[in-house]
Every structure is written in structure tokens, then in C-alpha cells.
Amino acid sequence: MTATPGEAPVRDDLLAVRELRQGSDNAVPLVLLHGFPVDSRMWDAAAAEAPGERAILAVDLPGLGGSAGFPLPSPPSLDDAADAVARTLADRGVESAVVAGLSMGGYVALALLERHPGLVAGLGLLDTKATADDDDARANRLRIADAVEMAGAVEEVLPMGGTLLGESTRASRPTLADTLTAWIAGQRPEGVAWSQRAMAARPDRSGLLAGFQGPALVLVGDEDQVTPPAVAEAMAEALAASQFVVVVRSGHMTAVEDPSAVGAALGDLAQRVDALVEQG
Ligand code: MLT
């Protein structure tokens, strides 16, 4: 497992992917989509805790991490991010996967489900929501995107290194905020601004949930203020075959705050998918 963002891919229409674990042939791969404004490194600890021998692929979304040089489509759209994920996986021969996304990664997972449904054999929605932004949230994102772009620096979003964490984590492991802040500080301002604008433009995808029949996981930290447990519970209820997991004493960045709980839940989800595949 590497500790740095992925190398930029050779083809500029593909995203950087870090293979956190190599897999066996009969296990469906697990694809992990990170939150904002960080990159695939946020999955390292949870992936290490996931049981099993399946391939685990952590993708760097457009403009972030090892995908900093990805040509950013205009206007910014998570649909393009989802298409790029699908193209990148196809290039690696992945036709079906357990797709799990945290927060922004969850928005992209839902866009993938809508646009490339055959790819999503299992769905993990962590600390995320299916609804669109309200007007205030959208305006705030556009303000932040403008500020980051005008400054040519990511200072505006640096405080998220602390605020995304739950109160319990901030008290018990204050250095985790430093780690998150360092990840944010290393992002390219253009990628941060593009991601904010793309999130602002995303549609409500709540209607997709009821149509997904495959195994699903909805997971949330009980101290998540960004996408609180009630929002997660409603998504779990809308899905046909979901497991709902609340991670205690954790905020919005569950995968970083409690990697063992998240790794175990992702492992369970993936095993449910394998069991279905075995049944044929
Ligand atoms: C994230 O963690 O990806 C962000 O909090 C998502 C958002 O701003 O909606």
C-alpha cells in the first residue's frame, strides 16, 4: 500500500488509481471514491482493515490527488467525474464492482449508478446524501470556488481539516486534523474549485435509490454534521437491500476516524455481493 497519491495515468482521459490490495479472481473488486477536498489517501487505513482478498482500487477524482492534471471538463459536472471513473475502470478490465463513496465520492457513486448501472454490483454510501444542494449551499460552494480560484490557493478550505472530523475525534486524536489539513493543502486550487462547482450542479438523485436491487450499505458517523444520521437513515430505508451502520464517536470522515468499523462494513457489503454472484 502506498502512502502518496497515485501517479498520474499515461492517458489523459483516465484517472489515477491506487491499487490498495490485489485481489483473487472470484471476488468482485471494491472501488473507493473519496470525499472533498482530499484524495484517495483517505481510504488507506479503512482498506487495510477490510477483510478478504478482493482487489481494492482507490480512485483520485478529477483535479485531485494523482488526478490533479486530469483535463477538467467545462462546465464542471459530477456526471463527467462518473464517466471518467467508468472509463478508467473499463481500461483496467473492471466491468462490475462494489462501488463505495464517501460524501462527494457518494455523489459520484450515485452518478455512476445512474449513468453506468451495469458497473455497480454493490453500493456503499458513506456520510453522503442523495439530494441536491439548496440555494444557500449552492451559493456558498460557488463563493468558495471563486475565492480559491482568485487566490490560486486552497486556504479557504483548509479549516475543513478540522471541521469534517467529529468532536470526539478532535478531542481524542487531535493530530488527525493535521493529517487531513496536510492532504487538503496539497490539492490543486483548480481541482478544488472545479469539485465545488461540480457538486453545486449535481441533481437530486434520491429517486434512484428505490430502483437499486443490489446489496447496499449506508454508513454514517453519529457526529456527522455535514450529512447527519437522519439523512443516511432515510437513504437506507429507500434502498431495497441495505445495511444501515452508525459509527459511534465519529464525524463526517468515518473512513479516517474509525477505519476498522468502516473496513469491516465494506468487507460485509462486498461479501454480500460475492454471495449473490456465486448464486448466479
Ligand atoms: C465531502 O466530504 O466530500 C464534502 O463534505 C461534500 C460536500 O461538501 O457536500
Image: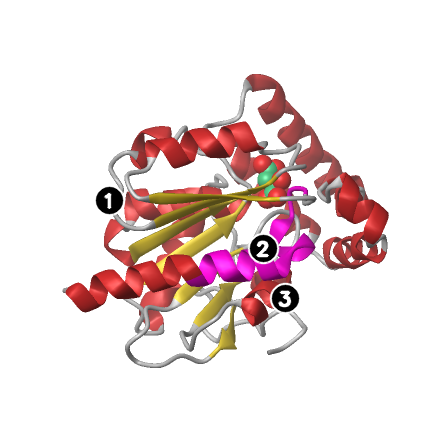
Q: Is residue 184 visible to us here?
A: yes
Q: Quadrant of the C terminus?
A: bottom left
Amino acid under disc 2: Gly
Q: How far from the left and from the top, in percent, is residue 80?
A: 41, 48
Q: Residue at x 65, y 55 (%)?
A: 258
- What residue is pinned by disc 2? 63
The local secondary structure at tag 2 comes to loop
Nearer the N terminus, badge 2 or badge 3? 3
Q: Quadrant of ligand 1?
A: top right
**Mark 1 residue crowding within 10 angstroms, few (<14) / some (14–19) / many (20+):** some
**271 and 10: which is toward the camera:** 271
The magenta span reads 251-267
Q: Are marks 2 and 3 in contact (CB under 8 Å)?
A: no
- The answer to if 12 sits in the magenta stretch is no
Q: Cβ(mark 2) to ligand 1 < 8 Å?
A: no
Say few, some or many: other residues with alpha carbon within 10 Å of mark 3 (under 14 / 14 to 19 / 20 or more).
some
Residue 45 tag number: 3
Q: Are marks 2 and 1 in contact (CB under 8 Å)?
A: no
Where's residue 140, x and y in %? 66, 26
Residue 162 screen position, x and y as percent: 79, 44
| Residue type marked 1 | Gln
Horizontal side of 34 relative to 238 (left or right) equals right
